[in-house]
Image (tube, rainbow, N blue to C red):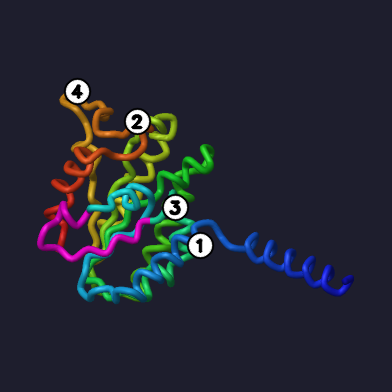
Amino acid sequence: MKKILSAFVLLFFTIAFSQEKKPMFWQDIQHFKQEDQQTPPPKNAILLIGSSSFTKWTDVADYFPGKTIINRGFGGSRLTDLNYFADDLLAPYQPKQIIIYCGDNDFADDHNLKAKVVVDRYKTFYKKVRARFPDIEVDFISIKYSPSREELWPQMKETNKKIAAFMKKQPHSKFIDITKAMEDANGNVRRDIFLDDMLHLTPEGYKIWTKVMNPYMK
């Protein structure tokens, strides 16, 4: 009886420890792997990588008829998560273009975070992308100004400016600025294109993104 009890206790702590060690968004990555096993990903697709603005764009293919798109947006990911899971997000695919949207959750996670830190995180991920895909198009969508995160806009603005300057110097790279398109006639961020959480986009918001993104899509 004691041996059985000891074995049970050992199993319990082993399971608990293994679960505790799993990084955030680990399950999302496993889901991608399952999808790729069930349906091998197409070659020469446009690969979307990033946070929940992509995650929630579940019908993105409908917005870009004629384009082959693989959406690998996951959870409320940060650039640190993109770097951590870089191999899982890049290795299974042979895209002709990668479009990245990420960064606002880095600031939401730490309101005192400096723009330079987020820019450096992006540069690290960009280098990982280029190490695997030296010649394809790689684009970054500017960090959006969500009304619910207005106090973080100054850091986001500085980050967008620095990433835009960085991308301008890189070959086959573009900075896709969605800022103006999301403003009204008075230059204010349109609240009507956000869901009730004032963070994620409505279908109308995604239509705006589509219009801006289309000229960049391969």
Report how many numbered discs are placed on residues in the image: 4
In which quadrant will I find the C terminus?
Answer: bottom left
Q: Separation of disc 4 and disc 2 at Cα?
A: 22 Å
Amino acid type, callout 2:
Asp
Q: Give the range drawn in magenta.
A: 60-73
Residue 70 is a magenta residue = yes
SS at circle 4 = loop
SS at circle 3 = loop
SS at circle 2 = loop
Q: Which of marks 4 and 3 is nearer the N terminus?
A: 3
**Residue depicted at x 23% and y 74%:** 42
Residue 168, given in percent of the width and then of the height, sits at 25, 56
Q: Separation of disc 4 and disc 3 at Cα?
A: 32 Å
Is residue 85 depicted above or below 178 in this figure? below
The mark found on residue 26 in the picture is 1
In which quadrant will I find the N terminus?
Answer: bottom right
- The mark closer to the camera, 4 or 2, is 2
**Residue depicted at x 13% and y 53%:** 214
- The mark closer to the camera, 4 or 3, is 3
Q: Name the residue under label 2.
A: 196
Q: How crowded is mark 4: few (under 14 residues within 10 Å), some or many (20 or more)?
A: few
Q: Which of marks 1 and 4 is nearer the N terminus?
A: 1
SS at circle 1 = helix
Q: Does the residue at mark 2 contact the one at mark 3 (Cβ under 8 Å)?
A: no
The mark found on residue 77 in the picture is 3
Q: Name the residue under label 4.
A: 186
Extreme residue toward the right, this view: 2
Q: Does the residue at mark 1 contact the one at mark 4 (Cβ under 8 Å)?
A: no
Q: Residues within 10 Å of mark 3 (few under 14, many from 20)?
A: many
Q: Which of marks 3 and 1 is nearer the N terminus?
A: 1
Is residue 45 depicted above or below 208 in this figure? below
Q: Does the residue at mark 3 contact the one at mark 1 (Cβ under 8 Å)?
A: no
